């Protein structure tokens, strides 16, 4: 059992390494364009609503906490508590997606969706229209990919929850809870990087 | 010579091949050995698909006018040749087949750490391959296997998204294989199998896995960006809208240069096994070979810019990438010298696998040394994007990787199939491959320095003689690949049964029957000695 | 039947590249021979003589390992050093180089001379004079490659690349596109003709009915309406063009920028990218998509010509006392029309 636990955990860590490189590629490309077009970058930040971003950051941090508590409950064999924490984690995860949805809607209303024809203009700073389109595209790509990971995470949580209801886990066996927790924390951490990168850095630049 | 003996007793024992029958027992198997066989079948199919395209390319280049097919068709030929060979043959070739089969056996494990993920990775590979084949059937792709932007993202009118999807998907198969190997090597070693006792083939696969896990996601995201750009025309790589086409090259080569080490490292691992076995001697400088695999994996991530010396990259970046490229050559040189030294005062036999190992050492030496011409800034300017690069790449990939794969396949075929192949035919085709290969690719070094650019459908008439030589060589090479296909298939039914250890080799995989039982070993082996302990005598005095 | 084994060497750097190439080839051949001989002799000398023969083990030798890591690396450092030196030397364009402008387009090379001649897939250069090519692409990445000169440079859309050479041998040599660029990539080939000085002058005076590049640029300057705001000698709504080229321009955001080809190109296509100090954003519309690469080059040559004949005594703003593109020694090109005074 201990051997299997170790193996699965190591497997998840290696997988997360892959994920880091995956997001790393996007972060890298985004950073290059930010460096190339600082003005355009600063101008996009006025359309990023840090309220949404901050709320989502808070929601995710809390969900990480509930997830950690869930893993602890699993380790101690507290089945009821495990289920409650899993539900809470899922609620926060869903809340994140809902808030993100509102935010995307706001971009849609603002005509800041360059991916779909007719929903893009940049009247506010036309001189940066072209590059801003590029940066917005990266914004949607990165947050969209992150949201996709959240959806996968929610799927994992649902599976774990069903398994927990069936009484699969015990203090001796809770490997799936542990590795799903790792995944969940990773997705949270990606957001912790996305939030300042997309919402905050440009803002301070614009203020200065 | 080989001790391939009729041994009916061995054949009677239950093994992974006769434990279950029916297609379901194969398609839903979790046995790493059966999955390896599935991989062997699928990559062989892809190899011949890619090979047909190679043949068509060489046929077109018989004459300088470009008169066999039109230029669009030719461009699709070399693109499909590249995509199929690189992403669907070379990258999975040794890790997914020989690695899948033998890494667990060599460390004394029953299976890989995640058997189900192993099967999933094969399915993912098949889905990716279907996409790639679909792009061929639908009408082909003409971007070159490198998918350079903005041609691929904006200008090409072919099935780029389909092909890129195929590569993207196949990438995940590669990631999962790498993940599985890393965890397996860390967690599943038999008692006594310390890191210092790991066979070098395992070390090589371990280093390969690191690259697969760290590099593949970057190319996946890069190709995803190309697809996105094609679908929405946002301008990620289109300079007309503010994008940077060179950024694509950086991201692409960040993976695709290490990817050539994904292709060659496992081949080097095979050669370490072959040279020791057929010299009956422990490896010279075990720790240096093991460390050099890791060294290649790490430094390999720092050299990608040497593909871009003429793009107008900053001079200092060029200097850095040039220097690092020389540095990455050192570990490869170390391996060559150590293999040669291993043969010193050995007991060398000339069985087919060893012939392939000789071929590998020679051709890889040439491939590696000509790489230095490309790492040297001033000469690279002249020879980059010419046939010189084509020749260099094929010397490493075909002369290196494919020969190692063939050598490994011959070496372990008795273990995989439980049968011996006809030795005479095998030696004959090994010689054909060696001769045909050199005739095909050596003239390309000359056409390259003369200045014939690669990916040319029609070329200047003065290059014709050398091109005819290439084409002649290619037909010999093709024959050299077809003969093994035939005798391997033949041997599965008619070949003499193999004993459990026909070569007298060391290594845990030879301590179990041929073919191995489903769980590899009757009982978990306990390792008490280092790898390649062919002799228990004291060390000889070195001359 | 032709069987060339070595390319013609027809530029000033060709033979130095070849020497490096010979050195690399010699070292490689020696190394290959060394390995081959070792493998062969070991294979023969230590061939298995009886089936149960077991040789004595040799585990390794630290001294040998160090030797065959360090010595090859030191040899490789000589490659690196020599290659880098040549690369750096060939990167700096001689100040007296004559300009030729090359636009790559699927699937042809369009070549313009400052004197006004235009050619497709043909390049005429005089012997013994450095030639600087300014490379631009209208669509995808191409690569301008003259094997006989041992020079090659990618032509990347959206920017200018430069390369240079001095031809040393009269004759006709291949031009190839070396970066795969689509259907007729292999048809994107041409010839460079190296003429002696007299023939070249004759050839030059033969064409150019549309006037020099600067004249054509001036025409464009009027046609596109640039001249309504960019006045020649007095301050309009936009910066004055005379004397701009090669100077250091003060920007609104406090920085400065060297007014070179790339800067002028950017200012035409994306005017708001760098605003000159004292001027406003959004005054000038973008000309992206309205002007061809060749037209852009003509405008640049025109603006450059204003710098050459502009009041040279006028104090240059910024630190650079010597403009990057210093007035060239009087030659035929300086006397071209299009620079009316």
Image (cartoon, coloured by chain):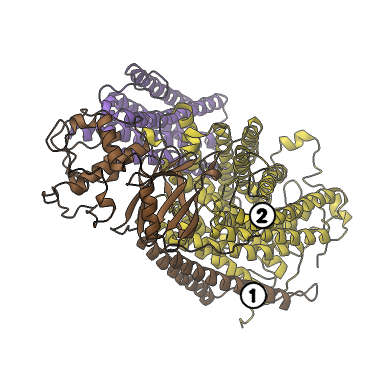
Chain colours: A purple, B yellow, C brown
Which of A192/C179 is in front?
A: C179
Residue C201, above or below C76: above
Q: Give the percent coordinates (x, y) of residue C40.
A: 69, 74
Above or below residue B489? Residue B447 is below
Residue at image point 60% right, 45% down: B457
Q: Residues within 10 Å of mark 1 (few under 14, many from 20)?
A: some
Q: Mark 2 sits on what residue? A: B402
Work out whether A39 lies above or below C257.
Answer: above
Image quadrant for the C terminus of chain B?
Answer: bottom right
- Residue B16 on image: x %, y %: 77, 45
> Which image quarter holds the N terminus of chain B?
bottom right
For disc 1, the marked residue is C38
In the shown orientation, is residue C170 left or right of residue B426?
left
- Parent chain of label 2: B
Q: Neighbour class for label 2 at 10 Å: few (<14), some, many (≥20)?
A: many
Residue B140 pos. (x, y %):
62, 35
Q: Position of residue B530 (x, y in %)?
A: 63, 66
Q: Chain of mark 1?
A: C
In the rendered image, is residue B189 in sight?
yes
Say what secondary structure mark 1 lies in: helix
* Residue at 84% across, 58% down: B422
Q: What residue is shown at x 54% (from left), y 60% (from top)?
A: B449
A83, above or below C148, in the image: above
């Amino acid at each position: 059992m201990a051997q299997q636990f170790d193996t699965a955990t190591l497997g998840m860590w290696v997988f997360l390494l892959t994920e880091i490189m995956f997001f790393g590629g996007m972060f890298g490309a985004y950073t290059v364009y930010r460096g190339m077009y600082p003005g355009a970058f600063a101008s996009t930040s006025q359309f990023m609503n840090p309220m949404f971003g901050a709320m989502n950051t808070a929601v995710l941090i809390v969900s990480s906490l509930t997830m950690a508590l869930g893993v602890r409950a699993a380790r101690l064999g507290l089945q009821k508590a495990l289920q409650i924490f899993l539900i809470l984690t899922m609620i926060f995860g869903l809340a994140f997606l809902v808030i993100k949805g509102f935010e995307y809607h706001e971009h849609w209303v603002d005509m800041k969706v360059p991916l779909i024809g007719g929903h893009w203009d940049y009247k506010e700073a036309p001189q940066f229209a072209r590059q801003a389109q590029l940066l917005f595209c990266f914004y949607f790509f990165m947050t969209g990919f992150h949201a996709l990971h959240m959806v996968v995470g929610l799927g994992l949580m649902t599976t774990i929850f069903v398994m927990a209801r069936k009484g699969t886990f015990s203090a001796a066996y809770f490997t799936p809870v542990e590795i799903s927790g790792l995944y969940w924390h990773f997705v949270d951490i990606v957001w912790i990087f996305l939030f300042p990168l997309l919402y905050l850095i440009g803002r301070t630049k614009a203020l200065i | 010579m080989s001790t391939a003996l009729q041994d009916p007793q061995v054949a009677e024992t239950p093994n992974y091949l006769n434990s279950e029958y029916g297609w379901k027992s194969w398609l839903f198997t979790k046995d790493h050995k059966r999955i390896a066989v599935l991989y062997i079948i699928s990559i062989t199919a892809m190899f011949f698909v890619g090979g047909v395209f190679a043949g068509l390319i060489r046929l077109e280049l018989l004459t300088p006018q470009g008169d066999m097919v039109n230029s669009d068709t030719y461009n699709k030929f070399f693109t499909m040749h590249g995509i199929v060979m690189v992403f669907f043959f070379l990258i999975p070739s040794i890790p997914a087949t020989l690695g899948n089969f033998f890494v667990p056996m060599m460390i004394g494990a029953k299976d890989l750490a995640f058997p189900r993920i192993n099967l999933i990775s094969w399915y993912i590979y098949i889905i990716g391959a279907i996409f790639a084949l679909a792009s061929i059937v639908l009408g082909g792709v003409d971007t070159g296997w490198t998918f350079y932007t903005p041609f691929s993202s904006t200008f090409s009118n072919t099935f780029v998204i389909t092909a890129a999807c195929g590569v993207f998907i196949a990438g995940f198969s590669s990631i999962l294989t790498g993940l599985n190997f890393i965890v397996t090597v860390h967690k599943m070693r038999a008692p006594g199998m310390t890191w210092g006792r790991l066979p070098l083939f395992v070390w090589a696969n371990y280093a390969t896995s690191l690259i697969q896990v760290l590099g593949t996601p970057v190319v996946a995201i890069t190709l995803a960006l190309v697809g996105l750009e094609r679908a929405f025309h946002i301008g990620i790589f289109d300079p007309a809208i503010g994008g940077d086409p060179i950024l694509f090259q950086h991201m692409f080569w960040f993976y695709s240069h290490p990817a050539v080490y994904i292709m060659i490292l496992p081949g080097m691992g095979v050669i370490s096994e072959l040279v020791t076995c057929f010299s009956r001697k422990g490896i010279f400088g075990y720790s240096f070979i093991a460390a050099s695999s890791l060294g290649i994996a790490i430094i390999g991530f720092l050299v990608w810019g040497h593909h871009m010396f003429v793009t107008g990259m900053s001079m200092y970046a060029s200097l850095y990438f040039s220097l690092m490229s020389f540095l990455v050559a050192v570990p490869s040189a170390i391996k060559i010298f150590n293999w040669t030294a291993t043969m010193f005062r050995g007991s060398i036999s000339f069985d087919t696998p060893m012939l392939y190992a000789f071929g590998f050492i020679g051709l890889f030496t040439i491939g590696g040394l000509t790489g230095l011409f490309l790492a040297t800034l001033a000469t690279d300017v002249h020879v980059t994007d010419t046939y010189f690069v084509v020749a260099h790449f094929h010397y490493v990939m075909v002369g290196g990787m494919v020969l190692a794969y063939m050598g490994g396949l011959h070496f372990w075929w008795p273990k995989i199939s439980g049968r011996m192949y006809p030795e005479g035919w095998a030696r004959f085709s090994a010689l054909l491959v060696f001769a045909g290969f050199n005739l095909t690719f050596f003239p390309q070094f000359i056409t390259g320095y003369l200045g014939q650019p690669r990916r040319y459908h029609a070329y200047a008439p003065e290059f014709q003689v050398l091109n005819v030589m290439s084409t002649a060589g290619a037909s010999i090479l093709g024959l050299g690949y077809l003969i093994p296909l035939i005798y391997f298939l033949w041997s599965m039914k008619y070949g003499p049964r193999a004993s459990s250890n026909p070569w007298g080799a060391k290594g845990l995989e030879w301590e179990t029957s041929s073919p191995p039982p489903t769980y590899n070993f009757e009982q978990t082996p306990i390792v008490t000695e280092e790898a390649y302990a062919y002799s228990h005598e004291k060390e000889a005095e070195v001359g | 039947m032709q069987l060339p084994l070595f390319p013609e060497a027809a530029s000033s750097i060709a033979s130095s590249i070849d020497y490096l190439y010979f050195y690399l080839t010699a070292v490689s051949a020696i190394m290959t021979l060394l390995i081959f001989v070792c493998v062969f002799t070991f294979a023969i000398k230590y061939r298995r003589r009886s089936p149960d023969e077991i040789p004595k083990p040799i585990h390794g030798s630290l001294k040998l390992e160090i030797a065959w890591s360090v010595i090859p690396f030191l040899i490789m450092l000589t490659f690196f050093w020599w290659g880098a030196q040549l690369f750096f030397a060939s990167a700096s364009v001689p100040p007296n180089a004559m300009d030729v402008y090359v636009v790559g387009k699927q699937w042809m090379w369009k070549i313009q001379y400052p004197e006004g001649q235009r050619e497709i897939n043909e390049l005429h250069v005089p012997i013994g004079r450095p030639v600087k090519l300014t490379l631009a692409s209208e669509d995808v990445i191409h690569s301008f490659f003259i094997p006989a000169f041992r020079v090659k440079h990618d032509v990347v859309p959206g920017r200018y690349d430069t390369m240079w050479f001095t031809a040393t041998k009269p004759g006709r040599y291949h031009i190839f596109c070396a970066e795969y660029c689509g259907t007729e990539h292999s048809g994107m080939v041409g010839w460079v003709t190296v003429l002696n000085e007299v023939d070249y002058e004759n050839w030059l005076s033969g064409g150019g009915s549309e006037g020099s590049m600067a004249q054509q640029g001036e025409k464009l300057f009027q046609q596109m309406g640039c001249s309504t705001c960019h006045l020649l000698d007095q301050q309009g709504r936009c910066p004055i063009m005379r004397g701009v080229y090669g100077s250091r321009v003060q920007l609104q955001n406090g920085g400065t920028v060297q007014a070179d080809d790339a800067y002028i190109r950017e200012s035409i296509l994306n005017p708001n990218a760098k605003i000159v100090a004292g001027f406003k954003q959004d005054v000038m519309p973008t000309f992206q998509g309205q002007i061809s690469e060749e037209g852009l080059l003509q405008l640049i040559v025109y603006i450059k010509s204003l710098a050459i004949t502009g009041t040279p005594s006028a104090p240059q703003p910024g630190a650079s006392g010597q403009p990057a593109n210093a007035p060239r020694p009087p030659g035929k090109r300086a006397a071209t029309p299009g620079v009316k005074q």
